Image (cartoon, coloured by chain):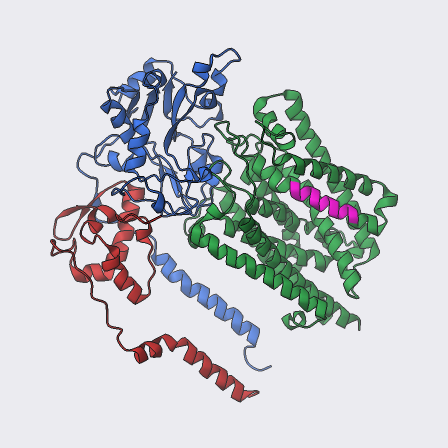
Amino acid sequence: MTGIGRRRFLGLAGLGAAGAAAVPIAGALARASRAEPAPGAAAGKRWAMVIDVQRCKDRGGCDVCVQACHAAHNVPAMPEPRHEIKWVWKERHENVFPEHVTPYTPAAVRERPTLVLCNHCDNPPCVRVCPTEATWKRADGIVMMDPHRCIGCRYCITGCPYGSRSFNFEDPRPHLRGEPTDYPTRTRGVVEKCTFCSERLAVGKRPLCVEACEGIGCGALVFGDLGDEGSAVSALVRGRELTRRKPELGTSPHVFYVL
Amino acid sequence: MLEKALTGSRSYLGLLGALSAGAAVGFVVYLHQLQVGLGITGLSRDVPWGLYISQFTFLVGVAASAVMVVLPYYVHHYKAFGRLAILGEFLAIPAVLMCLLFVFVDIGQPRRAVNMILHPTPHSILFWDMVVLNGYLVLNVLVSRATFRAERAGTPPPRWVKPVIYLSIPWAVSIHTVTAFLYCGLAARPFWLTAILAPRFLASAFASGPSILILLALAVRRWSSFDPGREAIAKLGEIVAYGMAVNVFFVALELFTALYSDIPSHLEHFRYLYLGLHGQAALAPWMWVSLALGAASLVLLLVPGLRRNETVLAVAAAAVVLSLWIDKGLGMVVTGFVPSPLGHVTEYLPTLREALVALGVYSTGALVLTVLYKIAITVREELEA
Amino acid sequence: MFDGGKVVLGLAAFLGLVTSPAWVRLGRGGGEPPALEKPAGEKQCIEPTAFMRARHMQLLDEWRDTVVRGGARVYLASDGKRHDMSLTGTCLRCHADPEKFCIRCHAYAGVEAYCWDCHQKKRRAP
């Protein structure tokens, strides 16, 4: 055989193509932009939330917080229960805090509705397992989601000890509850969850669930900056005996409960 | 050499045709899954991993088990494995390929799979699984290509092959250990959070992989003039016996810790697995079948007189594969999610479309296996002619 | 060379196949850039048209990463005006219907973008 030989030629061509493909990939890395924070953007050191379960219970079947969040964030109402998507919702007390329930706990307490959502842990296992950093921990404590980068492997769902995350098993847009708001919907194949309304914090507003709860005069949800010693959450967290979900796992959740 | 795979008897070509059809069906259903989303599967918010990931987990073990042939033959110069070695290596390649395919069909946004390379995340075990699995594929392709070509030419293999083979041995152990690490480091899933998960994976790999190789070797002997050797197959039988014994022992160890400690967070998963929880018990019948098959296979394997009978060995090997396929597949993966972190029992059963995609992946792997084996057998037949 | 005739024939068939989009389009006629429906109201986008035409992709990429991953929301345009870095809130406020603007050029150029799977104000029928 004269010349380079068929196999060597194919091998070199393959290597060359791979090399040529690497150039645009390298150029795709993001660059700095002419950007600045919005005026009045909330700058917290460590965001946290306190949920007063008794105040919430006294309202009976109220779920204005859930409605406000799911409406504004275009969370769909999926007809198939297996494909349910929820960012904040109520569970029975015995499911959220099984360690607080004894064989003698009355049914009313066992069945007491308790609000649950992403705990924005200090040591989040979901962030640890994500293979693309589509979910990561911000400096201000919020565990964020980038639905553009998510590859839909669902490892974060597997890693979350609280069941806080939902997956888009199908296209969510046909199942929106109302007219879509400005907040982008997500697409099939990505994971979503509560982000402490980071888009509202960025313009100096508070999470919708908290505002909705205050709006009906209940105030069961308190949100603020633990880095600010004068804030209401600081007073609660440092002054009262509060509970967190599954503290023995070392995740250090930052959603606290007054039981 | 590929042209050797394109000619053969009518039944061989028929097999290629059937496997290609299976792959095509799976591919078409996968396109449907791309269009609609993973909603076509039986997965749910509470059970995000199911058939695809369970098959990936089982097949990583099969891929790793090639080391059970490579180690004796190349490192300890166990000559009886001389004709078997290539069959073992040519089993590892489609096994790893199917692992990668099963992960690929499982992710929700496959067009973004390249994000794992653009944004490498070393603190994620999934990143390392991608690295070691692709590396193992490359290693196996390089080694088997070099040794096979050398054997065909009647020359000794190039000198770089030996250190690469030595590298492939801990690498084989690593692919299954890293896959176990996907599961056993999660605080959220107490059923998997056990140090013995990685040893269990390895023991079941060294039982199921060589069992598949036994069945393939017997099939090759029956349908061609290539005989891997009675001693080699018998030795594989011994390896499977030890692997299965250790695996069953490990299962018993797990059961003891769960049952004796009586801690609900440990026990309730096992209860769901074998008895059902809150009235839901879809997996329980399968687990008892797995247990029965495992026990039966162990009896057949541990009695030397029975094990040395090749027909009995074939039955035992099939029982091992089926038992471990159930146990390490859906048994292990789904039970990790039941009950959910909030104490709910959501059952999982694969849908027909999901099963067809899985069948497509298996057909693709079987197609690659058939082609590779045909090449190996044809070259052997030519060498011996 | 061996089989020279077959090789030349194969090469010719390959070249014909690979250039087929060009001469099929030539045969069909047309193929001018599409007419884009400009929004009523605003006469100027946040940056000049030439800039947007050449670099809207990079701009949107930067906005996405800065807002989602960086946390900053306000863009300082070259004319000194400030805009919220939001595809749905800023761009789609004027270019409300991607079918009449974005998709026309993208279909013509054959560049698939799926931004409007999520960034869209219209409801999609179930």
**Residue at the farthest top position:** A104
Q: Position of residue A125 (x, y in %)?
A: 46, 34
Chain A image colour: blue
Chain B image colour: green
Image quadrant containing the N terminus of chain B: bottom right
Q: Position of residue A103 (x, y in %)?
A: 53, 13
* Rendered view: B317 above or below A63: below
Residue located at (45% from left, 68% from top): A16
| Residue C106 or residue B208, whichever sits in front | C106
Residue located at (31% from left, 78% from top): C28
Direction from residue B302 to residue A241 in the image, left or right: left
**Residue at the farthest right position:** B305
Q: Is residue A46 visible?
A: no
The region drawn magenta spans B315-326
Q: Is residue A226 magenta?
A: no
Chain C image colour: red
Residue located at (15% from left, 53% from top): C78
